[in-house]
Image: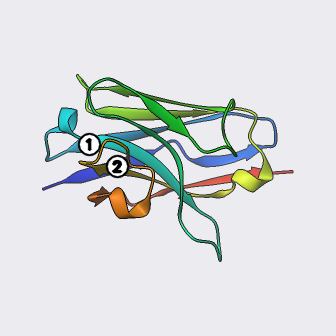
Amino acid sequence: EVQLVESGGGLVQAGGSLRLSCAASGFTFDDYAIGWFRQAPGKEREGVSCISSSDGITYYADSVKGRFTISRDNAKNTVNLQMNSLKPDDTAVYYCAAGSYFFVDKVSNADYWGQGTQVTVSS
């Protein structure tokens, strides 16, 4: 059974940091790109960051560039998203997703999804 389990969400003040983790199982992790998405109330799900399968090439949305860092540990089947300098606009449910495309930067590129973790940034 494929599973992606996110953790690390919570409530933080503006300017603070959180580290999200995504633990994967049930598929060949090394073969899949992993992406982080977020969805705020009333908005569409958007790609935040992703990392390719084997060579670790990364992508960041302009809104998070310079503040978020994605990394993966293929030995542990995990992907982390370090989020610094958080802003109220970062408030959303954050999802990790796996896909067989080079990048999982669009919803349509994702094959598997986690259940999401809430991130709330207070002003």
Q: Are marks 1 and 2 in contact (CB under 8 Å)?
A: yes
Residue drawn at x 76%, y 55% is 89
Q: Tell me how far mark 1 sits from mark 2, CA to CA.
A: 7 Å
Q: Would residue 42 be found to the left or right of residue 9 on screen?
A: right
| Residue on which the image places disc 1 | 24
Residue drawn at x 37%, y 44% is 103
Q: Would residue 111 be found to the left or right of residue 64 on screen?
A: left
Q: In the figure, 44 relative to 49: above or below?
A: below
Residue situated furthest front in the rendering: 102
Q: Position of residue 31 (x, y in %)?
A: 19, 37
Q: Secondary structure at mark 2?
A: strand
Q: What count of labels does the image hold?
A: 2
> Alpha-carbon neighbours of circle 2 within 10 Å: few (<14), some, or many (≥20)?
some
Q: Would residue 26 be found to the left or right of residue 42 on screen?
A: left
Which color scheme is applied? Answer: rainbow
First in sequence: mark 1 or mark 2?
2
Q: Quadrant of the N terminus?
A: bottom left
Residue 5, disc: 2
Q: Position of residue 34 (x, y in %)?
A: 35, 42
Of the residues shown, which amino acid type is indicated by label 2? Val
Of the residues shown, which amino acid type is indicated by label 1? Ala
Q: Secondary structure at mark 1?
A: strand
Residue drawn at x 45%, y 45% is 7
